[in-house]
Image (cartoon, rainbow, N blue to C red):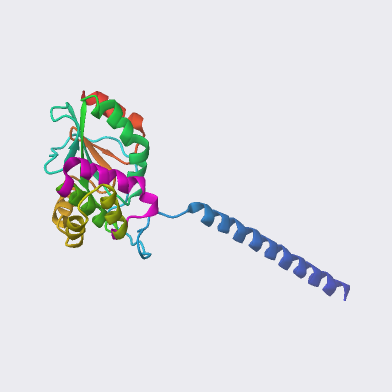
Amino acid sequence: MAKNRGKRVKIEFDEINLWKAGTIIFGILFILCSMKGGSDAGVGDAPTIEAPTPLPQAAPKAPSAPVDVEIGDAYVKGKKNAKVEIIEFSDFECSFCGRFYSQTYKQILENYVDTGKVKFAFKHLPLPFHSNAQKASEATECAGKLGKDDAFWGMHDAIFDNQARGMSVSQLKGYAADLGLDQGDFDSCLDNGDMEAKVKAHAAEAAKLGASGTPTFFINGVKLVGAQPYAAFEAAIEAAL
């Protein structure tokens, strides 16, 4: 009897230890899952499910050899004869694009565009898993169509400044009102998809250039990928001057 009681105590002790170990492992897994966080999802009037895509938002990469990239019909900031040309392919719903806008873009404008050294062009690359990115791009083009360069860049800034709040069609129309654009003409342009073809043409161009994520930049044809720190852009610009 004493021998059996000893086995029973040992079994119960082992079961308790196993239970404790399982609890600890579960707790660790729960903490790790909580820390991992999520990726950018579509933001708008209704929730969407993000699907896998061959066009991920870009992680920083080193510069490549120059390629031939044309500004074409893109809107441009800066002097036409500036020595350095930066062309950005961007997605308004991309968190990395928002990071570039908030942390680096304005420094480039102040230090290089406003001083006449750089001209900066914006092209569209709305990623397919961002449900509002296409319409956001169209909204900037509709604004530019109605109010020229200032309206395009005004809509560009309004969308990025409010990126965390979303960019539904109704919000985009609100930004147009804030910019003083003719509401009826803007709504018609956006609702009818008047600028859809232009946005898609930019995306097709990006694919041909090997721009597989956002943001992607071409600095005098040299590709620079991702929301890299200002110092990376500064080095690339200085090398091109």
How far across and down, in percent of the image, does residue 107 sit? 33, 31
Looking at the image, can residue 114 be seen? yes
Magenta region includes residue 152: yes
How far across and down, in percent of the image, does residue 31 sit? 57, 55
Which region is colored magenta?
Answer: 146-169
Locate the C terminus and report the quarter of the image it occupies: top left
The quarter holding residue 82 reads top left
> Residue at (18%, 37%) from the top-left corner?
76
The quarter holding residue 41 reads bottom left
> Residue at (26%, 47%) from the top-left corner?
179
Magenta region includes residue 155: yes
Query: Most extreme residue toward the bottom, as rendered?
Result: 1
> Residue at (26%, 43%) from the top-left corner?
154
Residue 20 left/right relative to 97:
right
How far across and down, in percent of the image, does residue 79 sit? 16, 29
How far across and down, in percent of the image, does residue 199 sit? 18, 52
Is 128 located above or below residue 180 in the figure?
below
Locate the N terminus and report the quarter of the image it occupies: bottom right
Residue 204 left/right relative to 212:
left
Magenta span main SS: helix
Looking at the image, can residue 129 be seen? no
Q: Nearer the viewer, residue 216 or 93?
A: 93
Residue 121 left/right relative to 165:
left
